[in-house]
Image (cartoon, rainbow, N blue to C red):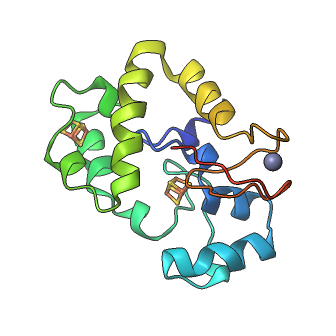
Amino acid sequence: MNKALAAPCGLYCGVCGIHIASRDNNQKFKEKLAPVYGAKPEDLICDGCLSDRVFGYCKTCPIKSCCSDKKIEGCHQCADFPCKFIDNFLIPVGKKVILRSVPRWREVGTQQWMAEEDKRYICPHCGYPGFRGVKKCRQCGNLIDLD
Ligand code: SF4
Ligand code: SF4
Ligand SMILES: [Zn+2]
């Protein structure tokens, strides 16, 4: 289990497109994702929220700082969830995922939660691993919608 991928907000980094493109050094995938994040392909580098190489916004995320101040691993350990930071989360689909993911993390613990998130984004048509926000499988081209 790579704990650097256990983003305190519940947006598990193992299924983040930026992390996958970075990990695989996949130039084609980076070029596809770059406009979505308003970044240059070469800047799409991230080893996970709790690693030493973190991408853009996630570096200064107030949710991460809040968990660190409270000395907890994530919002699943906070009685105030969902707080104003979650409510004001910039990306609507991200907020939807947080509201689903954090209670599940609380319920099953880190290891199972990570395993379930990994499985969740696998293409139901061909079994190719997807990523959060995927609309079309990169392998078989079928449309998928997995939040
Ligand atoms: S960009 Fe953010 S969500 Fe993606 S892997 Fe890095 S820290 Fe995690
Ligand atoms: S107050 Fe609780 S739920 Fe909100 S960001 Fe901080 S740890 Fe997470
Ligand atoms: Zn597929």
- The outermost residue toward the front is 143
Residue at point 33% right, 27% down?
A: 76
Q: Nearer the viewer, residue 107 or 128?
A: 128
Residue at point 79% right, 67% down?
A: 25
Query: In the figure, 54 relative to 12: above or below?
Result: below
In the rendered image, which quarter contains the N terminus? top right
Task: Name the spot of residue 104 as percent of width and height, x first.
Answer: 43, 22
Number of marks in the rendered image: 0
As drawn, is 80 to the left or to the right of 90?
A: left
As drawn, is 134 to the left or to the right of 59?
A: right
Residue at point 52% right, 62% down?
A: 54
Q: Nearer the viewer, residue 9 or 64?
A: 9
**Ligand 2: image quarter:** top left
As drawn, is 136 to the left or to the right of 140?
A: left
Query: In the figure, 93 relative to 116: above or below?
Result: below
For residue 40, which quarter of the picture? bottom right
Residue at point 36% right, 44% down?
A: 96
Task: Name the spot of residue 6 as percent of width and height, x first.
Answer: 51, 38
Q: Nearer the viewer, residue 32 or 6?
A: 32
As drawn, is 82 to the left or to the right of 132?
A: left
Q: Is residue 73 visible?
A: no
Q: Is residue 147 visible?
A: yes
- The outermost residue toward the bottom is 40
- The outermost residue toward the top is 108
For residue 121, which quarter of the picture? top right
Task: Name the spot of residue 31 as percent of width and height, x first.
Answer: 70, 80
Query: In the figure, 53 relative to 31: above or below?
Result: above
Task: Name the spot of residue 131 as percent of width and height, x first.
Answer: 64, 51
